Image (spheres, coloured by chain):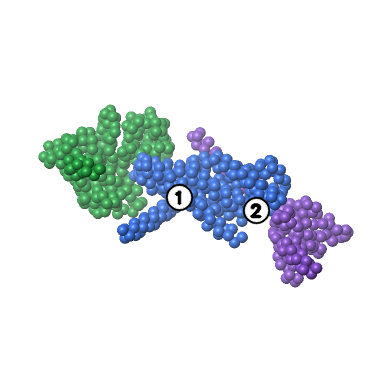
Chain colours: A green, B purple, C blue
Amino acid sequence: MMNDPQFVEVEGVHFSRGEKEIFRGVDLQIPRGKITAIMGPSGSGKTTLLKLIGGQLYPDAGRVRIDGHDVHRLPRRELFRLRRRMGMLFQSGALFSDLSVFENVAFPLRVHTDLPEAMVRDVVLMKLEAVGLRGARNLMPSELSGGMLRRVALARAVALDPELILYDEPFVGQDPISMGVLVELIKKVNQALGLTAVVVSHDIKETLSIADYVYVISDGRVMAHGTPANLDVDRDPRVSQFIHGEPDGPVPFHYPAPDYYSDILDERVGR
Amino acid sequence: MKRSKMMEFGVGLFMLAGILGLVFLGLRVSGLGSGVASDTFTLQADFANIGGLKPRSRVTMAGVQIGQVTAVELEKEWFDARVTMELDAELEGELSRDTTAAILTSGLLGEQYVGLTVGGDPETLKDGDTIHDTQQALVLEELIQQFVSNMVND
Amino acid sequence: MNKRRVTALGSATLDMIEALGRAGMFLFQASVGLPTRSGFHLWLRQMHFIGVMSLAIVLVSGLFIGMVLGLQGYTILVDFGAEDALGQMVALSLLRELAPVVAALLFAGRAGSALTAEIGLMKATEQLTSMEMIGVDPLRRVVAPRLWAGFVSLPLLTIGFSVVGIWGGYLVGVEWLGVFEGSYWSNMQGSVDFIEDIGNGLVKSLVFALVVTWIAVFQGYDLIPTSEGISRATTRTVVYSSLAVLGLDFVLTTLMFGEL
């Protein structure tokens, strides 16, 4: 079981929120030690998928296994123990606003280990150095820019040296420089620590540049998967529309609406 | 770290102030301990009717508070009300044996209290003694009833 | 048409029962668990934020209410020549009713709404989720210290309110209007019972503290994490806790003082 090449397996997951069906049978295999990207248009439930993997949401059907453990069958304590082996980088950074940068990174260490204060300090400074923010340790999260927030959050996510790290939209809303910094960091962290990474994103260029394997999700299903090189030449018009960012195609530009001409006429008649 | 020390100090002050406030309410407002703290001696008095007298009502002499009522119960022999009072220990052996006790009302609607008046007997009252000469409470309804029946008789 | 209304009523009732169940489980999960050293520090911080920061508004309100009671009480009592009973009136109305109720209402407005907004913001910025992912239960770490701090703070604030109010009544009644000082205090001491009046007032404020803090943290934890959701939940906290305080006050008063 330990040498299973797949670290995370998602099998036939169905999930709906209220009336809205978000997943209709999603299957994913996330290989150990690689960066796997999950891509798809906004609103396709990518973040929801991460929450399902992290055990924060429960699927209506299907199951998620991490290193052989069925996440949603674990008792609460076991689930929390499993989560210690995972790190997650949130879209907004999600730093604790009442703690300084240093304390934010130290948080997981203080909670889960009994390291002496000097050791905690060493580990925190090491992690902060890796993201280039050792000098910002005494700042509060409200004093940081968006890119810096995410870098601190990354330092916090890897503070316990996790085996799996989940990135939720790491590139959204970043200027080109901090985007480049983040891309480099994610790549570097992965190589240095040899961990398994899942990147959820719709920033195609950046994601394809770091991913080893890509899943494209649309309409609650996996639409396509393959290596970045394979996907780039995929003939499926839906895949090619997404990968090459064409505004209109099988995924329509327009929200479903009645015929434009008759709609306008209708309104005139109606008034 | 300095800020967190300030905060701890503030919270400590807050809780201390709350406890002191409770002590103030207990001692000054509800009068806990005002009768108990000093030395006292006990007297009893039987009244035909005590009206609205309650435990912790005042006991006065010449308008000065000298103690309080500690218990009110029914005495089974004559079916009188037996009132137990705690008085200032300084007065033990000072009050004459024929001291009278009356139940008085402060103001028209005020609370009822016991008023003591000394007599001339050289013998004095001691702890646990009973005052025999008592005057019952004025009950407004009875007064009116007497007044009306007098009118009718006339 | 009628059928639809019945259906809507039924589903609204079910929703309400479900929310009540969620709130109950929430309270249970947040309040169980042994106190720890770091938990004590978190509690202390919330005591500062919830209790100490509400002190000023509660004390100032208490002073004014006590002064108004002194003035109004005097004008009514003086007609019966019973202005000596002013101390009794001020103390009893404060201890039994005004201090627990008004302090709880102020607390809901000052601390309750802030608690809802704070927890809601933590939810909206995914801080609660990330805490869960780090393997820390936010119910223990975020909610429990706030719940306990509220539970301890409000009774202390209520005591402060009473003390300052009685002093305010004294200022107006004795210092200004000339009620005899001795009768202000002795009348008060003759009529206020420690268990019956002060004790029951404190029991009331403990109940209000639990209800107000519970509503506030639950509304924060259960809200829809958008800016509109936060503002709505904050309003709901103030409205629900005010109604709960006033309604419960009637029930508690009936139980405590009803047979008098």
Mark 1: give few (<14), some (14-19) or many (20+) Cα within 10 Å: some
What element does badge 2 sit on?
A: loop
Q: How many numbered markers are drawn?
A: 2
Q: Is residue A127 left or right of residue B84?
A: left
Report how far apart the C-alphas of labels 1 and 2 lie in the structure. 32 Å
Tag 2: residue type?
Val
Select label 1 or label 2 by which is in front: 1
The N terminus of chain C lies in quadrant = bottom left
Disc sitting over residue A68 in the figure: none
- The answer to which of A87 and B11 lies nearer the viewer is B11
The chain that hosts pointer 2 is: C
Residue occupying the point 76% across, 57% down: B104
Q: Percent position (x, y) of residue C202?
A: 57, 52
Q: Which mark is residue C192?
A: 2
Residue A64, above or below B98: above
User: What residue would you read off at disc 1?
Assistant: C240
Counting from the top left corner in percent of width and height, residue A92 is at 33, 37
* Residue at x-position 13% and y-position 40%: A237
On-image quarter of the C terminus of chain C: bottom right
Relative to residue B111, is residue A200 drawn left or right? Answer: left
